[in-house]
Structure formats: C-alpha cells, structure tokens
Image (cartoon, rainbow, N blue to C red):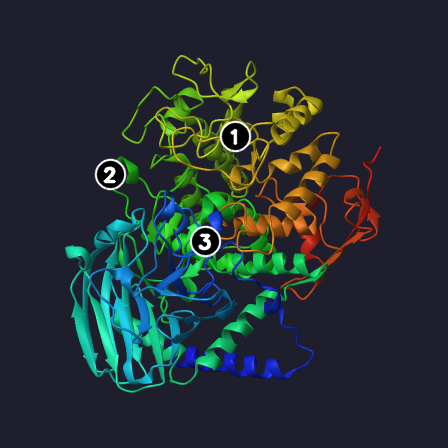
Amino acid sequence: MKTLFNILLIFSCIVLASCSQRKEDVKDYTMYVNTFIGTQNEGHCFPGATAPLGMVQASPEAYNEYYEGYEMDHVTGYQYNDPWIIGFTQTHLNGVGCPSMSDILLLPFGAKEIDPSSRFNYRSTYDKENEEATPGYYRVYLNDHKVNVELTASEHVTYHRYSFDHHENAKLLIDLQYGVSWDINSISTNVLDANQQFEDDYTLTGYRKASVWAHRDLYYVIQFSEKIAAKRVLEAPEGKEEEAPRYELDFNNINELEVLVAVSTVGIDEAKANLKAEIPEWKSFDKVRAAAKFQWNNILKLIELTTDENKKEAFYTSLYHLYIQPNNIADVDGKFRSAQSGVQESTGGKYYSTLSLWDTYRAANPMYTILSPDLVGAMLSSMMDSYTHMKADPDNPREANKYLPRWQLWGHETHTMVGNHAVPVFVDAYLKGIKAAGYSDKEVYEAVWSSVSKPHYRNHVALIDSFGYIPYDVKLSEIDDGRETVARLLENIYDDYCASLLAYEPGKTKEQIFLNSRAGYYKNVYDSQSGFMRGKNAKGEFKSDVDPTEVVGEWVEGSDFTEGNAYHYLFHVQHDIPGLIDLMGGKEAVAIKLDSMFYSSSKPEVKTLVWNIHGTMGQYWHGNEPCHHIPYLYKYTNEGHKTDRIIKILVDDYYNNSPDGLMGNDDCGQMSAWYMFSSLGFYPVNPCGGEYIIGAPQVEEAVIHLPNGKMFTIKANGLSETNFIVQSVRLNGVLLDRNYINHQEIVKGGELVFEMSSNAVK
C-alpha cells in the first residue's frame, strides 16, 4: 500500500507541476536561483539536479590539471573553471569541507576511440554557454563526445537523458570504483567491497561499500531505455587493483538514451522499489523535471522579497542551498541501514542524515524552525532513531556511551568537529513547541542527558568535572588527547546550558543546577592578562606567548582551538553575552575588542598547514562558523550601529551572484542561512530558545509565509546604499526598546518595520 501511495504522490506532484506551469499567476521562483553560486574556490557547492532533501544529486565531475590544493577544491567533485568533465555521478554533498560521495560515474561517448588505461582519458571539453542549471535540472554539451547530457532527479532516483550526434556509435562508460577523496591518485582504494551483475540486457544492479570519510553501504539499480548490444569489462587503470569494475556499453544506432539510477542503503530490491515508486515509466524526463521544479517552488515561495534582482538571486539561491539537506536516506517503505545495527524502520517513514550540526545549529536549524517546523520534528525523530539504535561499546572508550549525532553522514558518525550540537537543535525546537514524533519527553531528555554528561569521543566530561576546564597536559582516559581544549570546553558547555533548559521542564532540579554550573566554566579559561581565552595546564597555569592570530586545530598537538584562533573563540559564549561582557570589563571594553578584531591589519593565519584563508575582515573569518554571531555582539554594547555597517559589508562583498560568490564552504546551508537571517534583519546569536537579535535588514521588504497560514512582514523604510543604519524598530506598530524579537512574535504573524538612515542614533 505504501508503494501505491508513493506512486500516487509522485503522479499528483507531476500533475500539479504541469498545471502550475499553465497558470499565469503562479510565480516561478526558481528563476532567481543560480546553482553555480559557490561552485568555484571554497564554496564547494555542486550545480547538478536534486529534489529537496533528496538522497541523490546528479551532477558533473569536473577535472583539471593537478595543482597543490586540488583535492580540497574538489571535495564535491566540481570547480566551475575546470576545463574538462569526466562523467556524471549520483550523490554529492553541499558545501562541505571533507570529500565524500560522487558514487557511480556515468559518461556517454562514442565519437572517438579512447584509451581506457587511465580513467581521465575519457574527459571532454565543454563550453560554458552550453552548460545550464536550475533547481532540479542540469544540462551540458560534451564537445569531444558530441553528446548533449541532461540530468534531473526524484528523491531516490537520478534520471539521465543523452542525445548523441553520432547515433551509429553510442557508448556509455560506467565507473563503479570512482569517488572523490583526499588523494586523487587513491581512487583505487575508495571502494572496500563491491559486487554487481547484469540481470538482463537493460539492467545492472549491485552493491558498493565506499570508504572515504564514512564507510557507506550503497545498493543500486541502473536501467537503460535501450538494449545493450555489447559490453566490455575494462582493466583497472594504471595497473592498480580495484574492487569495483568499469564497463563500456555499446548501444546499436540510437539517437537518445535514457538511464535511471535508483539507490538504497538497504538492498537491491529496495532500490528497485524506490525506482518503481518514483519513476515508473520511460519518456517521463520532462515530467520528473517539472515535479522537481514544483517542489522547489513550494519551498522558495515561502519568502517573498522586494529588492533588486542581484539580491533576489543571492537570497533565493541561499534558500535553495538550505534545503538540499538534510537528506532522507530511508527507502519509500521507511527502512534504512544504520551505522551499527543494520536495517531499521524509521519513525514516520523518513530518516534524515547528512547532519553537519557543528555548522548548522547556529542559523540553519533555527531557520528551519520558522519555515518548516514539520521538517524539524522529523529531523528530531531521525536523531532519536539514531540514538535508540546505537549500541554502546564498553570496551571502546570513544563509544562507551550512547549519544545523539554529531556529524552524521548516511547514518554513519564521522566524528568531525567538536561539541554535541544535536542538543541545542533539540532544545531550541522543544522550547518552540516542536517535538520528536514517536518519542516521549522522557526518552528525549535521556538522550540529551547522556550526550552531555557521559564520556564519549571528544566529550571530556571527566576532565571538565575534575578541573573545571580541559587541561592540555592531563589524560584521564583514552579519549583525552590534549587537543582543541579551549574550543571543546566552550562548545560543550554551550550544550550544557541548552540541556539545562530541558532539565528545567521535567523538574530535574539537581541536573539543572549541575548543568548551569558547568555552563559558566568559560570563565575558567579567560586569561585577563592577554584578554583571550587560553589553554591551561593541570596546575592552572595559562599558556604564554601564544599568537592570537594563528589558526590551529586537531592537527596541532596541544592546540587550544578547533579550526580557529584566539579572536574567534574569545566570543564563543553564545548563552551568556552579559556575563562575558562583565568578564571582559564592560560594554566599552568589548566594543574596543570587537574593533580590534574587525579592523585588524592582519588576518587569521594557518602556520602549520598549506591553507589560504579567504573571506576575512581583519581577524574576523566569515568562512568559519564560530565567527557568525560575532558581528551582532555590538548590539549588546553602546555601539550597535557598527553591527549595521559590518552586516552591509558582509552581505554586499562576501556573497555575490558568481561561481566564487561564497567566501567559505556553504557547510550544508549554514553560510546561506546566515545570509538569509542577516538580509531579513535579525539573527539567533544564541540559537537556542527563540531569541533573535535585531540587526539591519538588507532588503526593502520581505514577507515570510508561515506554515500556519499567517504572514510576518519585514519592511526597511528608507533603505539605500547610504541609508543602512537602523534608527528605530517597530513591531506591530509598537516602538521596540529592546535589541531582540522572539520566535513567538514571528510565528504569530505581524509586521516588523525598520526606519533606516545614514547616521548612527545619538
């Protein structure tokens, strides 16, 4: 019955999409999305086709001559300025900093003979004027192969359509070994295990276990609209042994070939069921494309902007990036494969993974609570599914206790970054009335409590409880490594603060007091002599002669911070800004310190790695998420207008409508969410509890169409290139005498009106 339901659902989407295109009064917001934004330099976005929150993303793999830093640039397989395309893969990540995915490479060819001894010999040039992309669709013409390639996608299925100029010699390369990695020369080690079989002359099915970043189980079915006339198994390139093969397939005298690739984490039969449910017939490419466009428009229309075309493009592309993930990896029957426990039944039929929580808890997740509370509830249920199915291993100190996801990819924990930042996501949602369907408050509290109070990987609770900080020269267990000690403390105690708010709800007084006490431990690592947060040894002695501009991380023994420097983590006390202001000597002292950060003549510097940092303003690093709330801290001082000036600079200069238009990894929508909040005029400095600090809007008017049917309108009267300083703010006609609005005031609907000027308020 569920399969039938899904067929009817996709059919209804297709019908509605077709109808919507015939209505002149239906606005197409996808026209404002530029999927090439962030595809050059460090944005790490992909331009290809995906459905909202879909499991698959069909996109090109681009290629260039090797250079230092090549792998970092190509973690998602594509750089806009690359001269060649080597194929089209089915899975990609949006804006991340580590390579993974790019599964199952397909490349149509046949216009010339190719030496298969290197997989890169199949590359083709292409012209940028013959490459186009829009939400749910990608097209490019391959000059060397004389093939026009079109891609679209449903949730679990990619749809390829190839038009051959050389119809008498149409061929297709299938590379089941390929995948991006930290070493372009190590593709031969990407796949740990694989098996595959041609079930008939139209179908290839199989399994591959990829190893890069996280071990992932991928089952697939590849179907061809035309009969395979001949097939050849190619030897592994460069004489290396590989687990998965490459095939060349011949098709007799065809003008067009359609290929469907459906995937599953569970099994081949499940991949076939996903295919049957979502794309049950051939020659439906245009319908599937229309359905994807319809789904994207349903998201993009949630916010209606009045501003110039460039800002619309940047804003709606940000909104698009926000909803590429988290990705539902459950099959149409609701089953998925978890990291440790095998096949599981998801709560509510979806299992959302690709959880870059260290990044997204700051702005992306709060934005979801405004625009898509039902999605947030489903995400919470997925994270509870993860916790419930997790098996603690008492023999492994890293996994000795259960915890909520940290950075989860396809149901597997990567242990990337620090903190337990599913906790603020849960607590923020719960305080806003959004709960995990299928789970009781008691079960949720148990998961949150275990995550913050029990030791597991990078959760140094024994050291914190013993010293009040994490000394860099003490090891109480195997998880203690003396690295990133200040950042791990500051990020973990923020989670403690959030957990304390949940502890208050069930009346857990003892736990609340305990967590509130730990939430104040940031004071234990503040060195008043240097004016920064500093690492301490077991004797309580601060480090001396530390360069506050040097960016360090887990790669440095005895490091204080996580991919940041002393300026960045000085202000990482999101839950107690007034307490931090008192600690630093008052509002004037804090404003001076902020000035020294934003207007420094130096920039953050990585001295121990080859890492060219972009997107900086003095010591501020916009491409680094712990900095994202810092521009708003002037609003807690007597110089709030400085926030307005900095926001305008960041919105205008650090985001633009070109391929290099993101000054940093998009990080699963966090950079995009920052842009959206800052353009609208408020931001969650403390992203737990629903308080948004008022900033300075960068658009003349925005209407948020809320899920409850109400509207929240933001107006910036007098906004111009010279009038960007906020003079006053009225909420529903009442002058605000505070620096924030709250979540409930937004979701009730209403109007927030800014009066803008060129001068600061006296």
Seen in the image, is 757 located left or right of residue 430? right
Whether 200 is drawn above or below 708: the answer is below
The kind of secondary structure element at disc 3 is: loop
Whether residue 405 is visible to the viewer of this picture, yes or no, is: no
N-terminal label among 1 and 3: 3
- Which residue corresponds to the image point at 28% horizontal and 69% vertical from the top-left? 220
Whether 165 is drawn above or below 366: the answer is below
The kind of secondary structure element at disc 1 is: helix
State the image coordinates of residue 386 (x, y, percent, origin top left): 36, 53
Q: Mark 3 is on which residue type?
A: Ser
Estimate the spatial distance between the alpha carbons at disc 1 and disc 2, rounded to whole Å: 33 Å
The numbered disc on residue 440 is: 3
| Quadrant (top left/top right/bottom left/bottom right) for the N terminus | bottom left
Estimate the spatial distance between the alpha carbons at disc 3 and disc 2, rounded to whole Å: 26 Å
Seen in the image, is 604 located left or right of residue 334? right
Which residue is disc 2 drawn over?
A: 394
- Which residue corresponds to the image point at 38% horizontal and 16% vertical from the top-left? 538
Which residue is disc 1 drawn over?
A: 569
Whether 315 is drawn above or below 144: the answer is above
Badge 1 density bin: few <14, some 14–19, many ≥20, Cα 10 Å: many
Image depth: mark 3 or mark 2 in front: 2
